[in-house]
Amino acid sequence: MDQGASLGEEFQVLRQHLARLSDRRYRRGLVHPLEGVLSLTVLGLMCGCPSLSAIYRFGDTQPQLGLRRSPSVQTLSRLLGMVSVEEVRRALLEFVLALEQRRGHEITTAALDGKTLRGVRENSTQLKALCVFSREGLAALD
C-alpha cells in the first residue's frame, strides 16, 4: 500500500473517532461540523501551525476536510473551548490504538514528558499534558 493511500485511510479513521465527540451546540444554524473543525485543528497542529490564525489560514488550503470554508479564528476559539478535553484525549487514544491494530504493530517502548498548560482549564482545574512518544514511531500523544 502506498503512503498516500495510507494517509487517506488514516485520516478517515481519525474523523470517525472525532465524530463520536459530543457537540453541545444547538443544531439550528450550524455551519461547521465539529469533526471537520477538530480534524482541521489536529492536522494544522501536526503541520506546525502555531496559532488559531495559522490554523484558519491552513484550513483554506484543505478542501478534503469537507468544510464549506475555513472557520474564523473566533469560531475556532469558541468551538475548541466547548469541547471536552477528556473526550478529545479518549478519541485520540482510540484512534492510535485503531491504527496500531490495523498495522499489526505493537507499541513496546514509549517516552513520557509532562507539562502544565498555562491558561487551559476544564471545570476550573488547570490542565497538565502528558506527552507519550512511541519508539516505533506509531504514536505521539498528548
Image (cartoon, rainbow, N blue to C red):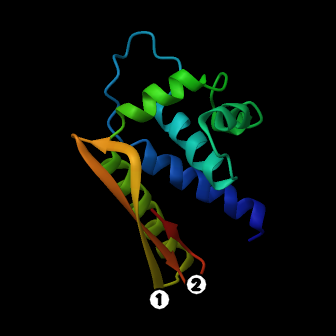
Label 2: how many residues lie within 10 Å, few (<14), some (14-19) or many (20+)? Answer: few
Q: Residue furthest top?
A: 29
Query: Which residue is painted at 58% across and 84% down in the image?
Result: 136
In the foreground, 95 or 55: 55
Query: In the orientation shown, which residue stands out farthest toward the bottom?
Result: 108
Query: Does residue 57 appear to the left or right of 24 in the view shown?
Result: right
Residue drawn at (69%, 52%) of the image:
48
Q: Is residue 78 left or right of residue 52?
A: left
The answer to whether residue 107 of the structure is visible from this angle is no
Which numbered disc covers residue 93? Answer: none
In this rendering, the answer to whether 55 lies above or below 125 is above
Pick whichever, 29 or 89, lies toward us.
89
Q: Looking at the picture, which amino acid does disc 1 mark? A: Thr
Residue at 52% x, 53% y is: 14
What residue did someone put label 1 on?
109
Identify which amino acid the numbered label 2 is placed on: Glu
